[in-house]
């Protein structure tokens, strides 16, 4: 095998994309009641969805199972070769099996389909030949046939695997919508991911409480309020009454602005914090999503938010750095 130096890589790539686009358009035009029947069968199943395929179809099967499982349809991949050597016991009569084979004649899948049919498992076949042996063994057939592979030799699965992947995504999204699957449902299956954190982490999970809170009363001197703010390292001091009700907030930004005003700066050494504090316009609650707190802070260009209950009593405080550490930003 020798490489040529005058290959037009962009022309080849565009041709591949064109062929695969045409294959997807053809798939869309021939979707029929079999697709709806497949969705209803999976939705009404009391078991799980098993997806299986050999070679490149096996890789697509694995990805399809992962997408379905993460969007509300319990699904997993079973290797057909392993299934014929013991893993067939993982498949139960109430399950639904999707077998994927472009030719529809993959020997391992034919044996697997025959064995599972004997104990009543529903078979959905995805093949490129509706008259193939695998299609004939199935209860429902989904056509993944393509006019041509993007591979110029017609050998490497290209258009066919793309079409199979797209049909798998179509199944997953159709089932997702039918189940009423929500952002919160998705987050529960992705707790370690960024989206999971944004949809599962609440303000109460990351806020500062107890001894960490920078709280002073209204008659506290400005000096002491500044010392409290400095010692807690949150860039703000909360002013509360004896019942813990929030009366205002004083931030390091407020302090800088106070010194910029000549008349105010002269009075600071003799003032109490009530002379400088402003009512707190922005706050949140512990049961709110941290991502919502982030949105408010970004919109109002602030870095700290008091956390209060329904009676406006302080329960905590949250800083932008807390959101960064939690992976919300």
Image: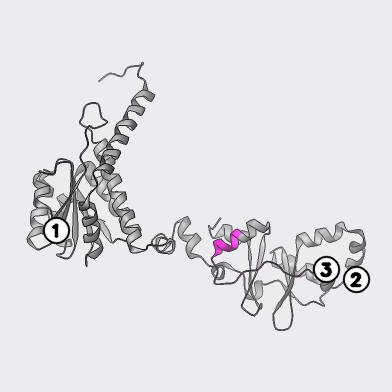
The region drawn magenta spans 277-295
Q: How is the image coloured?
A: one colour
Q: Residue at x 11, y 48 (%)?
A: 134
- Residue annotated with mark 1: 88
Q: Identify whether 324 is placed above or below 216.
A: above
Q: Position of residue 43 (x, y in %)?
A: 26, 62
Q: Residue at x 15, y 59 (%)?
A: 122
Q: Position of residue 182 (x, y in %)?
A: 41, 62
Secondary structure under the numbered disc 1 in the rendered image: helix
- Residue annotated with mark 2: 270
Q: Are the residues flagged by discs 1 and 2 in contact, CB closer than 8 Å?
A: no
Q: CA distance from mark 3 to mark 1?
A: 74 Å
Whether residue 171 sits left or right of residue 107 in the image: it is right
Label 3 Cα neighbours within 10 Å, binned few <14 / some 14-19 / many ≥20:
some
Q: Main secondary structure of the magenta part?
A: loop
Label 1 Cα neighbours within 10 Å, binned few <14 / some 14-19 / many ≥20:
some
Label 2 Cα neighbours within 10 Å, binned few <14 / some 14-19 / many ≥20:
few
Instruction: Give the residue at the far bottom of this rendering.
Output: 243
Quadrant of the frame with the C terminus? bottom right
Whether residue 5 sits left or right of residue 244 in the image: it is left
The mark closer to the camera, 3 or 2, is 3
- Residue annotated with mark 3: 276
């Amino acid at each position: 095998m020798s490489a040529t130096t005058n290959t037009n890589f962009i022309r080849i790539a565009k041709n591949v994309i064109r062929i695969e686009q045409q294959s997807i358009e053809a798939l869309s035009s021939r979707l029929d009641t079999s697709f709806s029947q497949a969705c209803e069968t999976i939705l009404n199943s009391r078991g799980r969805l098993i997806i299986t395929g050999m070679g490149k179809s096996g890789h697509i099967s694995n990805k399809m199972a992962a997408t379905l499982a993460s969007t509300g349809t319990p699904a997993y991949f079973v290797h057909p070769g392993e299934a014929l050597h013991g893993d067939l016991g993982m498949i139960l009569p109430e399950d639904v099996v999707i077998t994927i084979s472009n030719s529809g004649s993959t020997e391992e899948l034919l044996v697997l389909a025959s064995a599972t049919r004997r104990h009543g498992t529903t078979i959905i076949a995805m093949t490129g030949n509706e008259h193939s042996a695998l299609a004939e063994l199935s209860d429902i057939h989904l056509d993944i046939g393509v006019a041509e592979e993007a591979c110029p030799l017609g050998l490497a699965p290209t258009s066919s695997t793309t079409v199979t992947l797209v049909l798998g995504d179509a199944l997953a999204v159709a089932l997702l919508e039918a189940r009423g699957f929500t952002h919160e449902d998705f987050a529960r299956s992705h707790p370690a991911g960024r989206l999971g954190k944004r949809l599962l982490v609440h303000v109460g999970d990351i806020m500062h409480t107890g001894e960490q809170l920078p709280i002073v009363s209204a008659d506290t001197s400005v000096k002491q309020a500044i010392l409290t703010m400095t010692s807690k390292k949150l860039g703000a001091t909360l002013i509360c009454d004896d019942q813990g009700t929030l009366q205002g907030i004083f931030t390091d930004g407020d302090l800088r602005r106070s010194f910029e005003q000549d008349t105010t700066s002269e009075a600071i050494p003799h003032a109490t914090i009530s002379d400088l504090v402003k009512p707190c316009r922005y706050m949140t609650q512990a049961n709110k999503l941290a991502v919502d707190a982030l949105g408010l802070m970004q919109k109002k260009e602030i870095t700290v938010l008091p956390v209060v209950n329904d009676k406006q009593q302080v329960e905590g405080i949250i800083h932008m750095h807390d959101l960064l550490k939690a992976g919300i930003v």
